[in-house]
Image (spheres, rainbow, N blue to C red):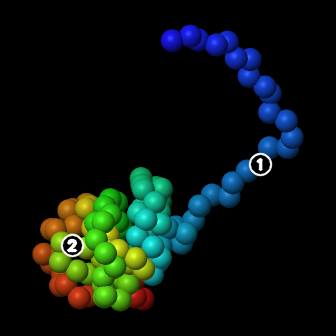
């Protein structure tokens, strides 16, 4: 391959600053499309971490995976077997989560202590 010498241009104009993202901006809204939630989870890892509420306490979602499934009829936030969670579009699989004051664990291990049909994201 040929290497072409490029002279970089200096930036012009006033610098812009992005505000620091707050923890609230990483609260998962399960009614959003699955791909949007998946991007939010990836963007929040490792800090500040995307989260939802589960049975009154905070549940961090470290990793999730799109299921490629068709839209599920369950209301957004409903925990399905797998463990998958219904979203505004297709279910999202919980790969790695962290309940409040507990270590990280697989979504499967977390689901073992909870039940299918519980709804995440409720206060």
Crowding at mark 1 (Cα within 10 Å: few <14, some 14-19, many 20+): few
- Where residue 27 appears, as percent x and y from the top left, is 47, 73
* Quadrant (top left/top right/bottom left/bottom right) for the C terminus: bottom left
* Figure quadrant of residue 25: bottom right
Q: Dividing the picture into quarters, in which one does residue 97 lie?
A: bottom left
- Give the secondary structure at mark 2: loop
Residue in the image at 80% along x and 27% along y: 10
Q: Position of residue 32 (x, y in %)?
A: 47, 76
> Where residue 54 sits: x, y (%)?
32, 81
Say which residue appears at 85% left-offset and 36% top-offset: 12
Query: In the image shown, does 54 or 40 lie closer to the viewer?
Result: 40
Is residue 56 among what the camera can see? no
Instruction: From the viewer's perspective, tell me whether residue 97 is left or right of residue 89.
Output: left
Q: Position of residue 80 (x, y in %)?
A: 22, 80
Which of pointers 1 and 2 lies earlier in the amino acid sequence?
1
Q: Residue furthest left?
A: 112
Residue 39 is labelled as none
Determine the secondary structure under disc 1.
loop
Q: Kindly identify the residue that appears in the image at 30 percent across and 66 percent down.
A: 68
Task: Give the side of residue 110 with respect to residue 75, left or right.
Answer: left
Q: Is residue 47 above or below residue 100?
A: above
Task: Describe residue 101's horizontal placement relative to residue 40 as left or right.
Answer: left
Task: Give the quadrant of residue 75.
Answer: bottom left
Residue 39: tell me if it is visible: yes
Q: Is residue 16 above or below residue 59?
A: above
Q: Within 10 angstroms of label 2, few (less than 14), some, or many (20 or more) residues?
A: many
Nearer the camera: disc 1 or disc 2: 2
What residue does disc 2 label? 83
Pointer 1 residue: 16
């Amino acid at each position: 391959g040929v290497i072409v010498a490029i002279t970089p241009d200096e930036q012009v104009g006033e610098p812009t600053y992005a505000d620091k993202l707050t923890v609230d901006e990483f609260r998962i809204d399960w009614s959003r499309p699955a791909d949007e939630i998946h991007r939010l989870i990836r963007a929040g890892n490792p800090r500040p971490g995307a989260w939802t509420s589960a049975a009154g306490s905070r549940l961090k979602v470290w990793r999730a995976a799109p299921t490629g499934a068709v839209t599920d009829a369950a209301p957004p936030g409903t925990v399905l077997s797998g463990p998958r969670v219904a979203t505004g579009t297709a279910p999202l699989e919980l790969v790695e989560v962290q309940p409040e004051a507990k270590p990280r664990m697989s979504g499967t291990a977390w689901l073992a202590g909870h039940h299918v049909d519980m709804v995440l994201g409720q206060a």
